[in-house]
Image (tube, helix red, strand yellow):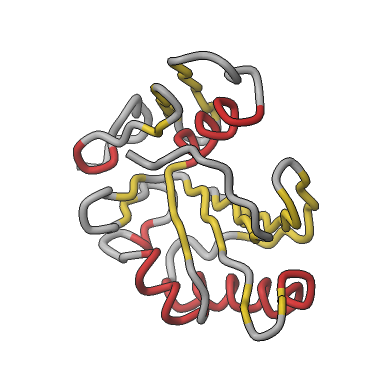
Amino acid sequence: MINNKSINQAVFAADIGGSFIRLAYSPEPGVIQLLDRVPTPANDLESFISALVTLLELHDHQGKTGTQKAPLALSIAGLIDPVDGTSFSANIPCINGFRLERELGIRLGRRVVAVNDADSLALAEAREGAGIGHNVVFCAILGTGVGGGLVTNGQLVRGAGGMTGEWGHGLF
């Protein structure tokens, strides 16, 4: 489970779908500024990493405090195994088997947190949206695929292999 406690620091957020990567910056909780959007290089891992590096280099001045770089939160159309961080995505095959948090953290020189896009939505709704004050929050996301996220008692529920409420693209 991922804890739902408030994070009181600036953070970059990347919504990574099969078609586009959208980068935003949140200088404080509840404030989000959309910065940029580029096509997702879905079939080439080095191009995928390069797209994120380029986006962050273009906008890093906003998230830098001293020598500390703002962390990057990824909301991704795919699964992130909660045990070893391995990613799987039908829409972004280049990341299959890649450990996004660990490997991108090293390459980008900052903390990286990655979660499924539906899980990200459910956690956001439980924390700051329609789910505030509810013990159980479920959200469905409809895009190229279909998925769901579940938060109970303020914590994100992540099933085996990262599957909780997922019924979209078959990966196996």
Q: What residue appears at the point 57 percent right and 43 percent down from the top-left corner?
A: 6
Above or below: residue 103 compared with residue 91: below
Front in this rendered view, residue 47 or 163: 163
State the residue lying farthest toward the bottom.
67
Front in this rendered view, residue 123 or 172: 123
Above or below: residue 123 compared with residue 130: below
The answer to whether 5 appears left or right of 100 in the picture is right
Quarter-wise, where is residue 135 in the image? top left
Residue 34 x %, y %: 78, 53
Residue 55 x %, y %: 68, 72
Q: What residue appears at the point 54 percent right and 56 percent down from the top-left corner?
A: 73
Residue 45 x %, y %: 42, 72
Q: What residue appears at the point 43 percent right and 47 percent down from the top-left corner?
A: 115
Locate the N terminus and report the quarter of the image it occupies: top left
The answer to whether 151 appears left or right of 39 in the picture is left
Residue 26 x %, y %: 72, 54
Locate the C terminus and report the quarter of the image it occupies: top left
Above or below: residue 100 compared with residue 3: below
Quarter-wise, where is residue 3 in the image? top left
Front in this rendered view, residue 149 or 67: 67
The answer to whether 18 appears left or right of 171 in the picture is right
